[in-house]
Image (cartoon, rainbow, N blue to C red):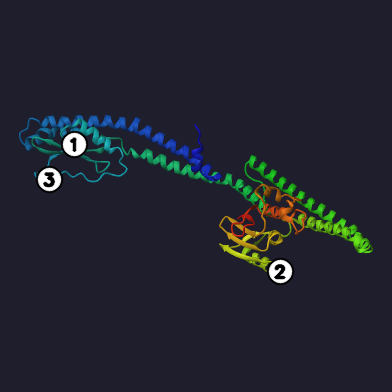
Amino acid sequence: MSAQWLKPYMPRSLYARSALILVLPVIVLLLVVGVAFLQKHLEDVTAQMTRAASREVLLVIDVMEDAETQQQAMAAVRPDLAALEMQVRFLGINEEPVLGTRRWYDFIAPQVEADLRARLPELEAVALPSGHEARLYLKTKLGLLELTFDRRRLSPTAPHQLIVTMLFFAVVMTTISFLYMRNQLRPITRLADAAQAFGRGRVVPYTPGGAIEVRAAGSAFLDMRARIERQIEQRTMMLSGVSHDLRTPLTRLKLGLSMLPEDEAAPLKQDVDEMQLLLDAFLEFSRGAAEGSPETVDPEALLRQIIKDARRAGHEVSLTSVEGEGTVTLRPTAIRRAVENLIGNAVRYGDRADVSLSIKPKSLRIRVEDDGPGIPIEQRTEAVKPFSRLDPARNQNQGSGVGLGLAIVADIARVHGGTLRLSESQNLGGLCADIVIGR
């Protein structure tokens, strides 16, 4: 039998699942013990005690059977009342039985009343107002008879004490277990926070702690983080070094080409310019999202400044909508580069770019739309890969580029713990690029 239907109802967090694992057996144990105690002990003992009390009541009634008046009945039964430890009286003509209110935790009282009614056909009413007194009202030929005796003769004393004791110690032990479990889960939570922060481009102080397995996982995370940081640093240094070293020969080539006739040097100058553009793209890609440190910024103010700069450059860019408000921890320089790349692509392949912002409690979305030819669905995955170039239909009369624009944006989004999503613009009909970052 599959348990897939149960998954939507199960808690998501580790703490909640651990609490469920801890509390569920305790509740089941309490239910099993409580039911077993009530059925196997309380009910059986109560039935025996009620049976004995019913025989004594029947004895009193039999003694009164031959009396013709209430006074004779009382005189006949008086010698036995001391031995039976009962009080007997007849109610007046207009006197009603006083039942009172049962205690809310007297859960054995219904069984006591049911057993008494089964054994005493003349029983009119039962009053169990406290744990020390029981009153039975029986119909006789002489009138309504009231018998008062100790309630403890009908059922065990304070049967609820066992349940109360079990619940009390269950709460105490569960609370202690929760405190201990929280201390055990705290190192896991710290590790998750450190991993999540690193996934979003922030390095928070972290020291392994907790159980041996958690310490091992924490140490492995620190080693992995150090290796990733070294790899990023080495990649940046390598690409920056290669790009820097190639600038010198390119400069000499430009000087040499300047001495050639214009018609002969034009094709070669174009190749050199493309190489220069490629080197600039290498440098930009090598910086990636590592430039600058995370800061708490206002995304709306950052976008308005980017759009303002784009308009100064002669691009038709507008901020169409802003949903939500607040600050977000970002690398502003990297986000600026990503948005500028998307706006540059939009105005390169179209005539205008619309930018929108959505700030939600758990996510941030920056959307850039254009009215260009867009990117077919089957090519969108390839478009975000480094050095990937699409078919000439999208690049006609616009230059082929080097295939790093969307790759840089995707890299910046990943470093912030987000993603780059490409789709078709519903408003302009071109490409819709979303930078979605979790908060």
Q: Are marks 3 and 1 in contact (CB under 8 Å)?
A: no
93 relative position to 211: left or right:
left
Q: Earlier in the sequence, mark 3 or mark 1?
A: 1
* Residue at the spot of label 3: 95
Decide which of 365, 316 is in the foreground and name it: 316
Crowd around label 2: few <14 · some 14–19 · many ≥20 (10 Å): few
| Residue at image coords 68%, 65% | 306
Instruction: Please say whether residue 310 is visible from this viewpoint.
Output: yes
Q: Amino acid at mark 2?
A: Gly
SS for dot 3? loop
Relative image position of residue 434 (x, y in whole percent): 63, 55
SS for dot 2? loop
108 relative position to 408: left or right:
left
Front of the two marks 2 and 1: 2
Crowd around label 1: few <14 · some 14–19 · many ≥20 (10 Å): some
* Residue at the spot of label 1: 86
Q: Mark on residue 287?
A: none
| Residue at image coords 7%, 35% | 72
69 relative position to 178: left or right:
left
| Residue at image coords 47%, 39% | 24
How far apart marks 3 and 1 lie (CA) works out to 20 Å
Extreme residue toward the bottom, this view:
312
Q: Are marks 2 and 1 in contact (CB under 8 Å)?
A: no
How far apart marks 3 and 2 lie (CA) works out to 103 Å
Q: Are marks 3 and 2 in contact (CB under 8 Å)?
A: no
Q: Amino acid at mark 1?
A: Met
Front of the two marks 3 and 2: 2
> Image quadrant of residue 168?
top left
| Residue at image coords 66%, 63% | 352
Quadrant of image for the C terminus: bottom right
Decide which of 325, 254 is in the foreground and name it: 254
SS for dot 1? loop
